[in-house]
Amino acid sequence: MQISLNKDIKSMSKPNRVFHHIRGKEPGATIVFFAGIHGNEFAGVDALNSILSEIHEDEIAGEIIGVYGNIKALKENKRFIDKDLNRVWTSKHLKDLKDENNPKNERLEQKDLFRFIEGLLASTDQPIYFIDLHTTSSKSLPFITINDAMINRKFSSCFDIPVVLGIEEYLEGPLLSYLNTLGYVSLGFESGQHLDPEAIANCEAFVFLALGYTGILKQPKQSKVQHYQNLLRSATKDINSTFEVVYKYHIKPDEDFKMLNGFVSFQFVKKGTHLANSNGEAIRSDYSAKLFMPLYQKTGNDGFFIIRHIPKFFLKLSGFLRSIKADQLLTYLPGITWYNKTEGVLKANLTVARFLTKSIFHLFGYRNKQLDQTHLLLYNRERVARKAMYKNEKWY
């Protein structure tokens, strides 16, 4: 099996945004797979072409949709042309997009994707699943990334592979963060290194299992289910823990950043380990923890991340606190006020509430973004999550 570099899409003058659409004869949920949001990541497209070409409408209840992300970048085998399409899904970018008359490159791609999403949401009241398929520049185990809402946690737990929480605190404008503000189950799947043939196999396994776990594929063959479960279990080396991002090295404009060779995602590094060079100066780890997504490509500003394992006790505790809506008590603490209660956004005055650590807010489901030098905005995905939409799904 080889990465195809998408000869099909390269040869098309104007590829259809939706390159797979299977509608079952029975009603049911809709699952949307985005592939190629980054134009140098082809495994998701290849995996969808392989798996979905074998599925017929009488085998499913609901709909399966495969969507190209950055079509122009895919045709040119580049991560992006002008802007990273997975960093522009902020409220400001979307507002500006509506007023833009002549969008080009990523702005045009985003406008088309946004039109697709709005049309889909207006067309159904059934559960919708959004899955963004990716690969990494470094060697990596397959893993899931999610915004930390319980519906995302519960669905992700079906796959029995590593799950990473909290990356949205360190990235500006990912597509999945936007979809999570709308309350839908949304997750990212990173299947392996860009040009590693195993990345396609891992992605095929994930796509097939997702169709089964959502119930859209009505009667998946158990032999295939077992095969794909074993494949992912082997690829992840039986690691199925939940991790949290605690640090990101952000590459500044014009910085000469170079990751040292040989590092891989989920590798344990000791505090003080020499990881990279910046303008000739050594960058060393401030943590004894796991390295995550070290950058081995020329584009992108995420040098590397550091992640830590979350004990099951804290996962259960946070689930309980959210179930009883204990976050309502946070506004009784000094320096904490509602910024937008409807959307579940708190504001923390750091000069008053500096004694509160990130981990406390994380327990209640809040992730933060810096507002200014003295204030944080804290976003809670639980308050906007459409739990009622998914309560009858078999995994819930």
Image: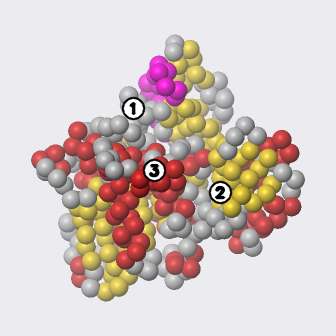
Q: Amino acid at mark 1?
A: Thr
Q: Which mark is residue 299?
A: 1
* Label 3 SS: helix
- What residue is disc 3 on? 96
* Disc 2/disc 1 C-alpha distance (Å): 29 Å
The segment highlighted magenta reads 251-265
Q: Earlier in the sequence, mark 3 or mark 2?
A: 3
Q: Left or right: where does residue 53 sit relative to residue 368?
A: left
Magenta-drawn stretch, dominant element (helix, strand or loop)? loop
Q: Amino acid at mark 3?
A: Asp
Q: What separation in Å lies between label 3 and label 1 (alpha carbons)?
A: 25 Å
User: Residue 226 versus residue 363: which sits nearer the camera?
Assistant: 363
- At label 2, the amino acid type is Tyr
| Foreground label between 3 and 2 | 3
Q: Is residue 175 above or below residue 136?
A: below
Can I make out residue 234 in this image? no
Relative image position of residue 158 (x, y in whole percent): 49, 67
Label 2 or label 1, whichever lies nearer to me, is 2
Tell me which label, 2 or 1, sits earlier in the chain: 1
Report how far apart the C-alphas of labels 3 and 2 lie in the structure: 22 Å
Q: Residue at x 53, y 61 (%)?
A: 180
Q: Which mark is residue 379?
A: 2
* Quadrant location of the C terminus in the rendered image: bottom right
